Image: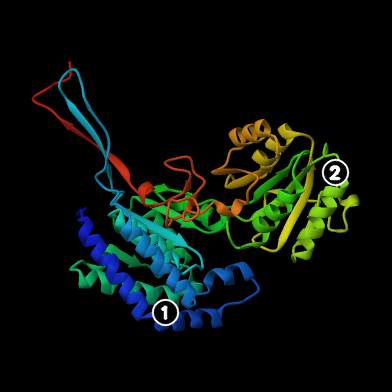
């Protein structure tokens, strides 16, 4: 594929910012059509769908951040000369064409595409039907920015396809396709994994846990749990489960305090059989599958574990491998927890809500990957490249 200069890519991004500012009212008006047609029964999905003036400003800010970052393509990873004289240089290179399949969130049309474009990839956007009007208005901005800078519109394509057409496209794409990033729930992710013929990078579900150790400082526990649970329920980094250690010297009091504070914040509490008799809630967890669920709602599960090892085993079994936190004053226990918990991000005495490209210093992100290849955690600009070996010789042959 054609490699664009950093100057050319940045010129497109500057035009993109200008058009989003100029067309802000049209973008918001298009989003209003989507909101009016949406069933508000799914509050988390509705929240993701909303585009107001502040959200457009956030999109512009995301484009500016990416524009100001260094071009990630063509960077030298290693440079060696072998005994036989071969000079081998490993450099970063574009993937090629990246398809992004996402639900509801129109800001993905900007924030994901801008990263893929700056990394010199062509982008195929397959947004959810609930955001068609918003997405189409935003893609118009992309196409105007590309055209103004002498580039074809096919650098960023918006695909309007139903489920059956999407399935067929994944199986038999009508153009080169190098990587697919599904952003959404487990049903979407499984659908893409089942039908895609190229690499799929999983932007995984949350289902995040907080483990409250016997020596946890409640002055830290309550603010962390409340923030992780209530700050943004639609975020994949939101908290779903709280596990309190049975060895806590005030086990029952700690359970009651956590329940009370969450309830006061408007969170519905469900509980395991071994703690429900100590709580006010009567909503007992009778189906083990609940522990695997990502709630995306003002809902939290409270349970108990017997020691650090039990906490680690429980979390590794049930969590989505996204973000998990330990609340303890014991540095050794915190270190063991963070080393042995198998997730993209692990925390000590901090809210899981920090698993975010901007919060972690990565900048705008394409997704939060829970895959182990090729990268886990926030996928920023530097992670949206692959690599290529350049081998320079002078007639060498292998013997």
Q: Secondary structure at mark 1?
A: helix
248 with respect to 150 (left or right): right
326 with respect to 169 (left or right): right
Question: Would you name the residue on which mark 1 appears?
Answer: 27
Disc sitting over residue 389 in the figure: none
Q: Say if residue 274 shows up in the picture.
A: no
Relative height, residue 99 to residue 253 (above, below)? below
Instruction: Report the mark closest to the observer, 1 or 2.
Output: 2
Q: Position of residue 230 (x, y in %)?
A: 67, 62
Quick one: which residue is furthest to the top in this view?
A: 399
Q: Residue at x 82, y 54 (%)?
A: 257
Q: Secondary structure at mark 2?
A: helix
Question: Disc 1 or 2, which lies upstream in sequence?
Answer: 1
89 with respect to 230 (left or right): left
Relative height, residue 189 to residue 61 (above, below)? above
Q: Residue at x 31, y 65 (%)?
A: 156
Q: Position of residue 373 (x, y in %)?
A: 44, 40
Quick one: which residue is furthest to the front in this view?
A: 219
Q: Residue at x 26, y 62 (%)?
A: 10
Disc sitting over residue 251 in the figure: 2
Q: Quadrant of the C terminus?
A: top left
Q: Position of residue 67 (x, y in %)?
A: 31, 60
* Neighbours of disc 2 within 10 Å: few (<14), some (14-19), many (20+): some
309 with respect to 84 (left or right): right
* Neighbours of disc 1 within 10 Å: few (<14), some (14-19), many (20+): many
Q: Say if residue 351 shows up in the picture.
A: yes
Relative height, residue 245 to residue 38 (above, below)? above
Which of the 4 image quadrants contains residue 211? top right
Q: Position of residue 197 (x, y in %)?
A: 39, 49
């Amino acid at each position: 594929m054609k490699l664009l200069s950093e100057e050319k890519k940045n010129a497109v991004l500057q035009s993109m910012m200008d058009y989003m500012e100029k067309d802000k009212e049209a973008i918001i008006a298009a989003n209003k059509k989507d909101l009016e047609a949406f069933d508000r029964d799914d509050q988390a999905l509705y929240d993701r769908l909303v585009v107001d003036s502040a959200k457009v400003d956030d999109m512009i800010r995301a484009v500016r951040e990416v524009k100001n970052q260094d071009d990630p393509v063509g960077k030298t990873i290693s440079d060696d000369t072998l005994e036989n004289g071969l000079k081998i240089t490993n450099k970063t290179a574009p993937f090629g064409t990246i398809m992004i399949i996402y639900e509801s969130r129109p800001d993905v049309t900007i924030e994901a595409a801008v990263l893929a474009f700056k990394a010199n990839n062509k982008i195929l956007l397959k947004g959810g039907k609930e955001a068609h009007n918003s997405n189409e208005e935003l893609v118009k901005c992309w196409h105007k920015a590309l055209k103004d800078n002498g580039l074809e519109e096919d650098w960023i394509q918006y695909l309007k396809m139903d489920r059956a057409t999407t399935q067929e496209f994944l199986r038999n794409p009508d153009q080169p396709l190098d990587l697919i990033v599904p952003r959404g729930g487990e049903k979407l992710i499984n659908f893409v994994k089942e039908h895609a013929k190229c690499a799929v990078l999983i932007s995984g579900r949350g289902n995040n846990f907080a483990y409250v150790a016997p020596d946890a400082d409640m002055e830290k526990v309550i603010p962390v749990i409340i923030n992780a649970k209530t700050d943004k329920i639609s975020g994949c980094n939101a908290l779903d489960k709280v596990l309190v250690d049975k060895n806590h010297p005030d086990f029952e009091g700690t359970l009651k305090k956590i329940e009370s504070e969450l309830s006061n914040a408007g969170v519905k509490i469900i509980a395991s059989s071994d703690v429900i008799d100590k709580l006010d809630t009567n909503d007992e967890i009778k189906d083990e599958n609940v522990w695997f669920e990502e709630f995306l709602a003002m809902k939290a599960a409270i349970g108990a574990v017997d020691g650090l090892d039990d906490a680690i085993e429980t979390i590794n079994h049930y969590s989505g491998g996204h973000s998990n936190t330990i609340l303890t004053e014991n540095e050794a226990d915190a270190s063991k927890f963070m080393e042995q918990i198998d997730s993209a991000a692990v925390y000590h005495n901090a809210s899981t809500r920090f698993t975010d490209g901007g919060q972690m210093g990565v900048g705008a992100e394409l997704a939060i990957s829970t895959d182990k290849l090729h990268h886990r955690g926030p996928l920023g600009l530097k992670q949206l490249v692959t690599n290529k070996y350049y081998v320079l010789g002078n007639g060498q042959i292998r013997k």
